Amino acid sequence: METQMADSYLASVDVFIPTTEPVPCSSSIQQLSSPEVSRYTKLMAQSASNAGKKLIKIDVTSDSVCPWCFVGKKNLDKAVALSKDQYNFEIKWHPFLLNPSAPKEGINKKDYYRSKFGSRADQMHARMSEVFKGHGLEYDLSGLTGSSLDSHRLILFAGKQGSDKQHTLVEELFNGYFTQGKFIGDRAILGNYLLQLSVELQANSMGVLSQINGMHQLSGGQPAEVFLRAFQVVAN
């Protein structure tokens, strides 16, 4: 049932996903210089009437198979939780493909990383395991990896149902892929996420959400403190 649901929905969705070279991870806050950058977080603030709090709009561009994107989300969530009494937040997620040629059918995750990174694969795994452990998570290399295109279609669709649902779905996708060995391209799994979120299926096409210029850019898995400083900057 879940596979049929996902097949019916995903077949109706068009999505343009930029595939330019990703911006290196950095701890600095920069002015946005190009609309075609990956793994970044853009922030802007505007007045809101809710108890006089300003609304901070956050646009995140990431890939569902990027571990540093998951780390960045965890740090962003922490910063938002620490600032919820000061600001209101609206978070939108936008797609990026780290590997546009990734196979749709999926391949063994460990074998793929060894073929791509060679002798560095074990060192990278140890590093990511340490980082994930700092967030109370176990970095799991079991299962398959492959094209994340369908996951991005699902994320964009969930965004039409509301930013909260979209944000929750992104968390589920990250958790499933990085800590539970779930294949990001499995339509049965994607269909199950649809059921969990009670997302209403619609047969409409969607494109990439619009981007807003003049905001701050944060690249990579920034710590929560960097997000907190950025909130203050855009709010003022």
Image (cartoon, grey):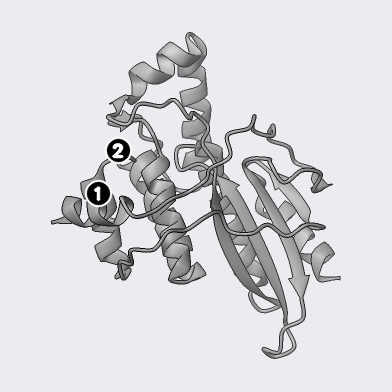
Asked which quadrant contains residue 231, the reply is: bottom right
Residue shown at the point (75%, 49%) measured from the top left = 217
Give the percent coordinates (x, y) of residue 226: 74, 52
Residue at the spot of label 1: 189
> Local crowd at mark 2 within 10 Å, few (<14), some, or many (≥20)?
many
Quadrant in the picture for residue 181:
top left
Specify whether 190 is left or right of 86. left
- Residue that mark 2 sits on: 183
* Marks 1 and 2 close (CB-CB < 8 Å): yes
- The answer to whether residue 142 is seen in the rendering is no
Residue 68 position (above or below residue 142): below
Q: Position of residue 233 (x, y in %)?
A: 84, 63
- Looking at the image, residue 111 sits to the left or right of residue 35; the answer is left
Disc 1 packing (10 Å; few <14; some 14–19; many ≥20): some
Closer-to-camera residue (75/188): 188
Kindly tell me whether residue 120 is visible in this rendering: yes
Give the farthest residue toward the left.
Answer: 1
Query: How many numbered callouts?
Result: 2
Label number found at residue 129: none
Q: Please provide percent x and percent y for residue 80.
A: 62, 66
Amino acid type, label 2 = Phe
Q: For residue 220, which quarter of the picture?
A: top right
Residue drawn where x is 61% and y is 56% of the image: 76
Left or right: residue 16 versus residue 20 is left
| Residue 213 falls left or right of residue 130 | right
Q: Is residue 152 above or below residue 213?
A: above
Q: In whole angstroms, how far apart are the C-alphas of marks 1 and 2?
A: 8 Å
Percent across and percent down for residue 228 are 73, 60
Q: Does dot 1 land on a helix, a strand or a loop?
A: helix
